[in-house]
Image (spheres, grey):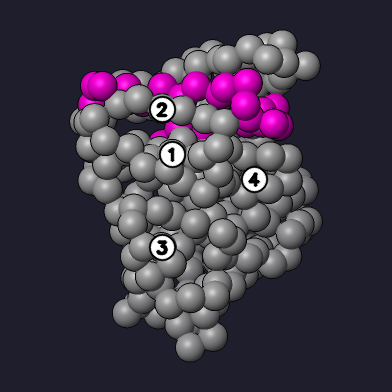
Amino acid sequence: DGGITQSPKYLFRKEGQNVTLSCEQNLNHDAMYWYRQDPGQGLRLIYYSQIVNDFQKGDIAEGYSVSREKKESFPLTVTSAQKNPTAFYLCASSIVPGPSYEQYFGPGTRLTVT
Amino acid sequence: SQQGEEDPQALSIQEGENATMNCSYKTSINNLQWYRQNSGRGLVHLILIRSNEREKHSGRLRVTLDTSKKSSSLLITASRAADTASYFCATDEGNQGGKLIFGQGTELSVKP
């Protein structure tokens, strides 16, 4: 099966701890994205990567970090500097970078920080 | 930044009825996409319409784009209970980088 996997589905952490969310794709897509979704809201872009070893900040990058060491993997670290980390996190990919292309989404990780 | 704004925020209809959702945006665009999200799941791409297109169909879906009014509509005909989901439009803000900008979505409930 081709697609995007995110793990785990649910994640619980204590305040002050860093946590890393996994995102893997076997679609051979160049571009990958991380979004945050709050209840009743649309998606907000955290970071995106157009190619391996390259990434750019999105609209709400503060308190987050990413890496893109392999084409198929784009992990997101939610650091203790992120003031309101509890949210639903979605990873996506597209065959090439650019908003003219369909994005394929993973099933999401719901992070709860207490 | 918020580009697409969906209207209505929530819509409840009976099975068999048509559902129309609207999206308005602020800047010029090259294309506009519609996505669907079932509760607690990832988004699924429905349709992409380019700025030089006025209408596009896919099965029971019909999307229109009016660039003069900076608006788009998504029509689902003969709705089914399985169409219950949130629907989002996403635009490219005139091709600024690789970003898609999503609206806040319309929550559609189709009652059997």
**Is residue B60 shown above or below B64?**
above
Q: Which residues are magenta?
A: A69-92
Amino acid carrying mark 1 in the image: Tyr
Q: Which mark is residue A66?
A: 2
Please report whichever mark, 2 or 1, sits nearer to the chain's N-terminal start. Answer: 1
Point out the frontmost of discs 4 and 2: 2
Point out the frontmost of discs 3 and 1: 1
Point out the frontmost of discs 3 and 2: 2
Count neighbours of disc 3 (C-alpha within 10 A) and say few if under 14, some if 14 to 19, many if 20 or more.
Answer: many
Which residue was labeled with disc 3?
Answer: B92
Q: Chain of mark 2?
A: A
Q: Are marks 3 and 4 in contact (CB under 8 Å)?
A: no
Label 4 and label 1 in one chain = no
Q: Chain of mark 3?
A: B
Give the alpha-carbon distance from disc 3 to disc 2, as whole Å: 23 Å
Q: Are marks 3 and 2 in contact (CB under 8 Å)?
A: no
Label 4 and label 2 in one chain = no
Q: Residue at x 23, y 46 (%)?
A: A96
Q: Are marks 2 and 1 in contact (CB under 8 Å)?
A: yes
* Count of numbered circles in the view: 4
Which residue was labeled with disc 4?
Answer: B85
Q: Are marks 4 and 2 in contact (CB under 8 Å)?
A: no
Q: Quadrant of residue A38?
A: top right
Q: Residue at x 26, y 35 (%)?
A: A54
Residue A75 falls inside the magenta stretch: yes
Residue B67 falls inside the magenta stretch: no
Amino acid carrying mark 3 in the image: Asp
Label 3 and label 2 in one chain = no
**Is residue A30 shown above or below A41?**
above
Which residue was labeled with disc 1?
Answer: A47
